[in-house]
Image: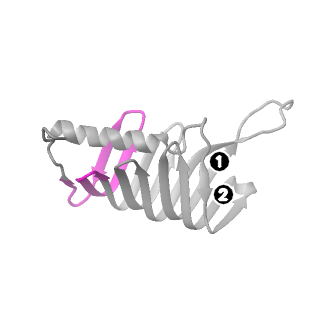
């Protein structure tokens, strides 16, 4: 039973860590509107937001992408941008294969924190298994998950020989 719970938690950590931080793969975003605030290093996507990267999909009502300009030499034409933090709000759903994370808000923090915080009736679904809490914090470096709530609830189905 404990081994199954650990597998679910590690699976979610892998799902969420591949979203936004994989520099090699592009982040695709679709929304009803987009506003760029260059002075604030912020891009806001509103309405029917769909984002995908590395096989992970994110759906939300609103998504804010905070970035910094990368430090390249003057001889290079493109200064580029580095994503620092992504905030998704309103009916947030993160999907990879059979796994899902849901909540009202998700914040993806990059370096140095490297963590994800899911709040507002947060839940994790892995096939029939379910973990519920008011706040789920995923510490990517430590491969650790902390779930808070009153109470935290989990439904874990033991493996059968047929699975």
Q: Earlier in the sequence, mark 2 or mark 1?
A: 2
Residue 43's disc is 2
Instruction: Please say if 73 is above or below 82.
Output: above
Q: Where is residue 3 drawn, in percent x and y?
A: 19, 36
- Looking at the picture, tell me which residue is in the foreground, 44 or 50: 50
Location of residue 108 in the rendering, given as x and y in whole percent from the top left corner: 49, 48
Q: Nearer the viewer, residue 127 or 71?
A: 127
Q: Residues within 10 Å of mark 2 (few under 14, many from 20)?
A: some
Which residue range is magenta in the image? Answer: 125-154
Q: Secondary structure at mark 2?
A: strand
Q: Position of residue 133 (x, y in %)?
A: 28, 57
Magenta stretch encompasses residue 142: yes
Q: Which residue does the numbered mark 1 point to in the structure image?
A: 67
> Residue at horizontal 81%, vertical 30%?
73
Label 2 close to label 1 by CB (< 8 Å): yes
Q: Nearer the viewer, residue 86 or 158?
A: 158
Quarter of the image containing the N terminus?
A: top left
Q: Is 41 located above or below residue 33 in the figure?
A: above
Q: CA distance from mark 2 to mark 1?
A: 8 Å
């Amino acid at each position: 039973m404990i081994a199954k719970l650990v597998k679910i938690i590690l699976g979610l950590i892998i799902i969420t860590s591949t979203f936004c931080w994989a520099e090699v793969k592009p982040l695709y975003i679709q929304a009803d509107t987009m506003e760029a605030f260059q002075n604030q290093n912020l891009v806001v996507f509103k309405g029917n937001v769909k984002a995908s990267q590395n096989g992970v999909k994110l759906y939300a009502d609103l998504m804010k992408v905070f970035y910094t300009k990368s430090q390249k030499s003057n001889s290079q034409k493109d200064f580029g941008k580095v994503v620092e933090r992504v905030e998704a709000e309103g009916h947030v759903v993160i999907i990879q294969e059979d796994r899902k994370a849901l909540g009202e808000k998700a914040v993806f923090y990059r370096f140095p924190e490297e963590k994800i915080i899911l709040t507002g009736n947060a839940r994790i679904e892995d096939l029939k298994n379910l973990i519920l809490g008011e706040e789920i914090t995923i510490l990517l470096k430590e491969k650790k998950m902390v779930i808070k709530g009153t109470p935290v609830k989990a439904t874990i189905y033991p493996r059968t020989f047929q699975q």
